[in-house]
Amino acid sequence: MSFKTILTVITDPSQTSQLDAAAALALREDAHLEVFCLGVDHSQVGYYYAGASAYVFQESIDKSMTAAETLEKTVRDRLTPNTALRWSVDSAVAQSGGLTTLIGMRARFADVMVQNHPYGDTAPPDAEAVTEAAMFEGGCPVLVLPRGDLPTEPPKKVMVAWNQSNEAIAAVRRALPLLVAAESVEITVVDPKPFGPERSDPGGALCQMLVRHGARAEIAVLARTEPAISDVLIRRAQETGADMIVMGAYGHSRFREAILGGATRNMLENSPVAVFMAR
C-alpha cells in the first residue's frame, strides 16, 4: 500500500516550498502529483452602491483569472525540469464561498493532500478553508507542513496521537505508508480512561495492528500534565525528536473548535513538526 495520487492546492505565489515538498513526496512514493491553482475572488459585491456590483464583480473575476494563470505558469516552470516526476496542473477561479465544493471534488480522488501551515502571518488567506474542504468535503487526509524548514526526507520518528476515536483510527489507516516506512512509531496515549474500550491495555490493539503491517511500533502512556492535551503531545514530540504527528481531526464541530479551541486547532497552530490529519 502506498500513496499514488498526491494533491496540493496553490492559492498564493509564496507556496513554492509547499509545491517542492509535495513533489518530493510524489517522487518518494512513485506517485502522480496533481497541482490545483486557484485564483480566489474575495470581493463582496453586496457592499457596493447600486449599479456598481456588476463592474466590481467583473474586475475581480478578471484579476482572479490573471492570478490563476500566473500561478499555473509558475508551477509549470518549476516542475517541467524534473523529468523523473509525473505531474499535472490545472487552474480555476472561485469566490471564497465556493472553495469548499471545488476543492472537495478534487480531494475526493486523492490519497493525500500536502499543504502549508494554515495559521500565522505567513499563511495564505484561504489556507484554513482549503485544509478543511479537503477533509470534510473530500474525505482526504492532509499532511500539514511545519513552519520554517520543510522536511526533505521521509519521517523517521512518527508519533501517533491515540485516543481510541474513529477519527484517530482513520488517520492511522491513511498514514500506513508513512508509518511502515518510519524507523520508529510511538503510539502516544494521554490520560487514558480506566473504563474505556481498551481498559488496562491502551494502544495495545493498535500496536499489534501496526506491527503486523511491518511498522516498528511501541506504546507510551502519559499523564495529562498540561491544560490542553495538544500541549502534552507537542512537548512529547519535542522530547522524543519525532518529525511527524499522526492524529484524527475535529473530534468536536468546527464551530466549537473555532470558538472554544480544541486539539485540532491547537495542534495546527503550535506544532513544530509536520502533522498528518484525517477524520
Image (cartoon, rainbow, N blue to C red):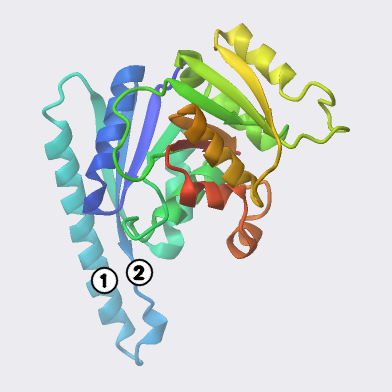
Q: Residue 258: x and y, percent?
A: 58, 61
Question: Is the residue 199 above or below the residue 103 in the image?
Answer: above
- Badges 2 and 1: C-beta atoms under 8 Å apart? yes
Say if residue 110 shows up in the picture.
Answer: no
In the rendered image, the residue lying farthest to the right is 195
Mark 1: few/some/many CA within 10 Å (<14, 14-19, 20+): some
Classify residue 80 by image quadrant.
top left
> How far is mark 2 from mark 1, CA to CA?
8 Å
Residue at image coords 26%, 71%: 60
Along the polypeptide, which appears first: circle 2 or circle 1?
A: 2
Classify residue 63 by image quadrant.
bottom left
Observer-nearest residue: 43 or 193? 193
Residue at image coords 34%, 55%: 123
Q: Secondary structure at mark 2?
A: loop
Horizontally, is 32 left or right of 220 in the view? left
Amino acid at the residue labelled 1: Ser
Mark 2: few/some/many CA within 10 Å (<14, 14-19, 20+): some
Residue at image coords 47%, 49%: 270
In the rendered image, the residue lying farthest to the bottom is 49
Q: Secondary structure at mark 1?
A: helix
Which label belongs to residue 200? none
Which label belongs to residue 42? 2
Question: Is the residue 206 above or below the residue 270 in the image?
Answer: above
Amino acid at the residue labelled 2: His
Q: Residue 82: x and y, percent?
A: 15, 25
Q: Residue 167: x and y, percent?
A: 65, 37
